[in-house]
Image (cartoon, rainbow, N blue to C red):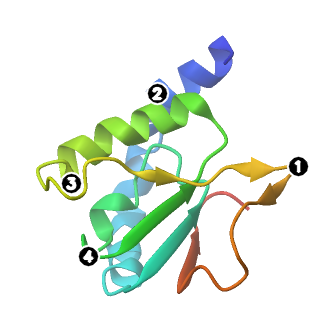
Amino acid sequence: MGLRQRLMARTYDRLMAGYERHAGPRRAALLGELEGRVVELGPGTGVNLGHLPKAVDWHGVEPSAPMREELRRRWAEQRGADPTDLEPRFVDLADGRIDLADDFADVVVATLVL
């Protein structure tokens, strides 16, 4: 885990604050009614978590350990009060492939990653 990755993870939300003021309402409209099992590609610091219904079964594909740490902090702030939902579930990559069955997800979300 390099210094650049840690610095990016720690400053990402501040750097993107202006964009999020603009994109937040659109993001809320797109994500707010999702159901079932959601796999998010590159969730970063977890900016989408606040827009997702808490009932979704969320799984994130995030290769950056520092981003995962920031997402865990956000998860605890936004969702951690529910004792059945204490930790985000991350999916690892295996040789560049997402390690999930083909029919695993009801919805796949990718924002600001492609």
Image quadrant where one finds the N terminus: top right
Q: CA distance from mark 1 to mark 3?
A: 31 Å
Across and down, in percent, residue 70 comes to: 41, 34
Task: Tell me the residue that label 3 is attached to.
Answer: 79
- Near mark 2 (Cα within 10 A), the count class, few <14, some 14-19 or many ≥20, is few
Task: Tell me the residue that label 4 is attached to.
Answer: 55
Image quadrant where one finds the C terminus: bottom right
Across and down, in percent, residue 113 comes to: 67, 57
Q: Amino acid at mark 2?
A: Thr
Q: CA distance from mark 2 to mark 4?
A: 29 Å
Residue 84, compared with residue 10, is above or below; it is: below
Q: Amino acid at mark 4?
A: Ala
Residue 38, compared with residue 63, is above or below; it is: below
Q: Which mark is residue 11?
A: 2
Of tags 1 and 3, which is closer to the observer?
1
Across and down, in percent, residue 110 comes to: 61, 68
Task: Tell me the residue that label 1 is attached to.
Answer: 95
